Image (cartoon, grey):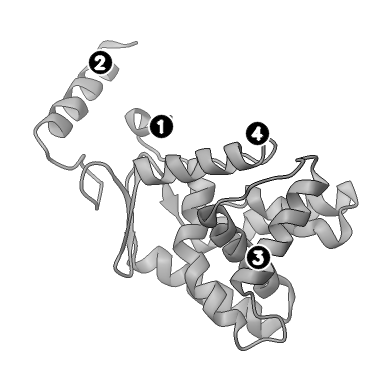
Amino acid sequence: MSFRRRLAVIAASSLLLAGCAVPGQGAAPGVAAEYDGTTLTTAGLDQLAAAWAEDSDGLVAPTRDQVATYALIGPAAVAATEDTDSPITTGVAANVASAWFEYVGVTDAEISDEVVEQVREILAVYVLSLTDEDTQAQLAEIAADVEDSGLFSPRLGDFSAEALSASMADAQTQASNLGLGTYTFIMYTDVSGFSAPDVSWAARD
């Protein structure tokens, strides 16, 4: 580690120990993101990612930025599906989650409520992104509002509607290449609206 990097690490550590936010971080220490009255902590995101891995026997394991993406855009996306022909209810999400985990090889999966809720959010984003131009515009507006109004820790990265759109396009391409068909939504687990932070000491862990 270079001398300059050591100084940066020491400075960042000192600020955290002092209870101050790291420069460039809009949220308090330990907080990964804040948006529309919702606070996402780093610990909470890690617990949600761990729940995915535990419920799926490690076969579905989204990262912190991926679960954060859906925690931020998911609630509004779910609400938006209520105006479509495919509203995503908790019951629908639970049934899809069971079929999904069975499809990837999980036997007799016991899926927690928090994972079912995030499956609901994933399905909602999937439906909006593919239904028609109107729903795609709704999803773009949701993402733009998160980008404009959210506060994010540099350890999580910068959220942008552009990054989300590119990530969804990648997911659709991968699903097509794999021939997933009706299970295309599976690849949306890998969707993230975050790009890596610019500052070296705030790299994701």
Q: Secondary structure at mark 1?
A: loop
Residue at (36, 39) in percent of width and height = 155
State the residue position of label 4: 58
Determine whether label 4 and label 3 are within 8 Å by CB: no
Residue at x-position 41% and y-position 66%: 146
The residue wearing badge 1 is: 203
| Proximity of marks 2 and 4: CB atoms separated by less than 8 Å | no
In terms of depth relative to the viewer, which is nearer, 75 or 162? 75
Examine the rendering and report whether any part of residue 3 can be seen: yes
Dividing the picture into quadrants, the one containing residue 43 is: top left
Above or below — where is 63 with respect to 137?
above
Amino acid carrying mark 2 in the image: Arg
Residue matched to label 2 = 6
Q: Secondary structure at mark 2?
A: helix
| Residue 170 visible here | no
Q: Mark 1 or mark 4: which is in front?
A: 4
Q: Is residue 17 left or right of residue 83?
A: left
Quick one: SS at disc 4? loop
Identify the residue at horizontal 61%, vertical 50% (top origin): 111
- Sequence order check: which comes first, mark 4 or mark 3? 4
Sequence order check, earlier mark of 2 and 3: 2
C-alpha distance separating marks 2 and 1: 14 Å
The earlier-in-sequence mark between 1 and 4 is 4
Q: Position of residue 61 (x, y in %)?
A: 61, 39
Is 36 positioned to the left or the right of 146 in the image? left
Q: Which mark is on residue 93?
A: 3
Mark 2 vs 3: CB contact within 8 A: no
